[in-house]
Each structure stands twice: as structure tokens, then as C-alpha cells.
Image: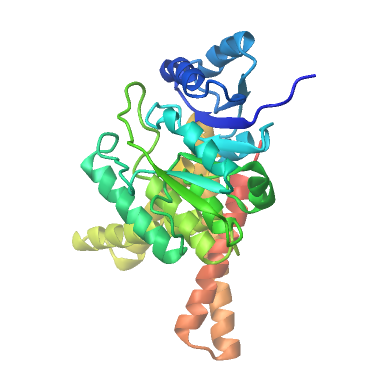
Amino acid sequence: MTSGPDLSIIVPTFNEKDNVLVLVERLRTALAGVAWEAIFVDDNSPDGTAWLLREMAARDSRIRCLRRVGRRGLSGACIEGMLAASAPVVAVMDADLQHDEALLPAMLESIGKGADLVVGTRYAGGGDASAGFTAFRQGASHLATALARRLLHVTVSDPMSGFFMIRRQIVEDVAVKLSAQGFKILLDILASAPKGLKIVELPFSFRERTAGESKLDSLVAFDYLGLLAAKSFGDWFSVRFAMFVLVGASGLVVHLIALQSLLGTRQVGFYYAQTAATYVAMVWNFFVNNQLTYRDRRLHGRAALQGLLIFCAVCSVGALANVGVARWIFFSNRTSAWAAGTAGALMGAVFNYAASSALTWRKT
């Protein structure tokens, strides 16, 4: 009988075949003398990342690979990896070599001295993000950090960091509150964990990616805002629902632009322009939701066309529910038009979300 590892390192991967071999070699060097395991959680990478990891695991029992099929997302991968860990302490880091593995022993030492959570920070105490971020992404990161600190009252300097270490029991305790969607698992943990955690921040220099490409895109902003909304309201609704509503809000903007454009031609009456703009917004909402809100159930090809038709049918019924509820509240309770309209819109959103989840993007 041998004792288990003292540290489990969770590494989510998608198309990181060119990086994982280098990362493992660096972990072996950095963690000499430490009993560790590395759990790579791969989202069925088409480049063969999982197969390479299995070959590595056959030669080194400290390497494990969890291959996820039909599930996508960095946060979900991190949660599954942490819950599958053997060690009492887990670390999360990216596979793209931008995080400094040499910091892991110091992080583990801080845990040994009583810390519950150790955050690798790019923004305090000598940390640096300039090499790994473009100026635009660095500005976006600072804005996202400011929003998180103001809305969720987190105190760490870098709540958006993807490089941290935590006692596994804390993750076990808050797992049911964590969202499997999105990219900011540390922020989710900070917002979900009980107050009073002993947190230590250690600076590191965020390195430039040398292989592969970033998995982040402009739609991640919706994802992040959805997480902020869900956590700000105490998890009364899911992050997926929050993102569905945010996408719907963007669809309203698309609707108004389309309506104005059609009316501007002076050849289309309001009724036809309004109808056309409504379906333009529905198409927009479908494709954005397909890319973001339901990325783990994303539809392709023929299934996407079928899904679009079902989504438009669902939203048409949702519009009737919206109007019906608003009309009933307005006339039966004599409330203001604003209150009745808000209630109707909420009813329509809930119906569209429930029906879309069950019919358009149903689990297979």
C-alpha cells in the first residue's frame, strides 16, 4: 500500500496537444519531492489531446485523463476534475503554458501554513499580465475585475485568475452552487463559498502563449455577465437562464435596428416591418444562444436548421404568453402598464427558456 498524492493539479484542455507534453515536464521539475497527480480534463479535442495524454499516463501513473464527450466548457471541466481528485489540495491551471508552474510549491506551502485558498495574481505584489495579454484584453480583464469586486464584493486583486490552489473539501462543500458554464471558476467559488476563507495571493508573470490559440471570444462577455447576474441575485436563477435573458436583450436591439431599417425604406408598412423585425431578432437569438448559452448542446448542420424552426415556433408561443399575462394583470389588477408589461415579459422569457431547453436544445 502507498499513500495518495498531496496535490492534484486540474488542467482543462481543448486542442492543447502541442502543449501538454511540455507542461508535464515542467510539472515534474517544479514539483520534485512533492507527491502529486495531474488530472487533464479534455473536452473531446479533435486534435488528439486525450490520446496523447493516455499514452503519457501509461508511462507515468501521476498523469490522468478524463475525456468528456457531449460536454463543453472550462468551468465544468474544472469542477469535474476537482471532484475527481485524490489529494486534499487541488490546484487549477491552464494547459497553454501561460501560468507559472514554478509557483506551485509556494502555493502548497501557503496551504500548509493555514491558507484555504491561494490565488496566483497578475495584478498585485509584482504580478504582470502584459506579456500574455493584448492591450485590449488587458483592459477588458481590468473592467471585468472591477465589476466583480463591486457587484460581488470579492476582495482579491485578481478574481478572474485561472491559476489557484484550494482545499478540496471547500470545493466539495460548494459544488452544488457552482455553474458548469463559463470560464471564471475562481470567481464562482469566491462568490459561492462561505465568508471567512483565509486567502493568500502570490504574484506571477502571465506568459505569452507559444502554441495553439485562445478559446476565448467576444461572446464570452455574455457568459461573464450571466455569471455576475446569477451570483448577484444569490443563485435564484441559473447562469444559463441569465445568459438566455441577456441574449434576448441583445435581440431587442437587433429588432429595433431591423425595424428602423425597414421603415426607413418607406416601402414597408409598420405591421409588416414589425413582423419581419421580430423574426430577424428570433434568428439572431437562436444563433447566439446556440453559440453561447447552449454551447454544450450546440446544434450543427441539419439539426441547427431544425432547431431554428422549433425555436421560432417556441418564441411565437412565448410572445402570446407574454401578451396574455400582461393583459390579464393590467385589466384584472389595474396595475400600471409598466408593471404588467414587465410581468408579461418575464413570463415570456421563462416560457421561452423552459421550452427551448426541453425542445430546441434538449439533452441527448
Against 4, is 360 above or below?
Answer: below
Q: Is residue 303 visible?
A: yes
Decide if residue 312 is in sight here.
Answer: no
Query: Foreground: 134 or 303?
Result: 134
Quarter of the image with the N terminus in it: top right
In the rendered view, does 15 fall on the left or right side of 324? Answer: left
Q: Nearer the viewer, residue 184 or 153?
A: 153
Tally the numbered discs.
Answer: 0
In the rendered image, residue 179, in percent from the top left (x then y), is placed at 57, 49
Where's residue 238, x and y in %? 58, 56
Colouring convention used in this rendered image of the protein: rainbow
Report x, y in % for residue 299.
52, 35
Tell me what residue is drawn at x 68 percent, y 45 percent: 169
Image-based side of 364 in relation to 100, left or right? right
Residue 90, picture quadrant: top right
The quadrant the C terminus occupies is top right
**Residue placed at 60% from the left, 88% from the top?**
332
Above or below 181: residue 34: above
The image position of residue 167, as x and y in percent, is: 62, 44
Say which residue appears at 57% left-offset and 65% top-offset.
234
Q: Quadrant of residue 120?
A: top left
Q: Nearer the viewer, residue 300 or 33?
A: 33
Residue 264: quadrant of the picture: bottom left
Which residue ends up furthest to the front in the rendered image? 113
Task: Please state which of residues 363 and 274 is positioned toward the viewer in this rendering.
Answer: 363
Work out which residue is located at the far right of the displayed protein and give it.
Answer: 1
Position of 86 compared to 206: left or right? right
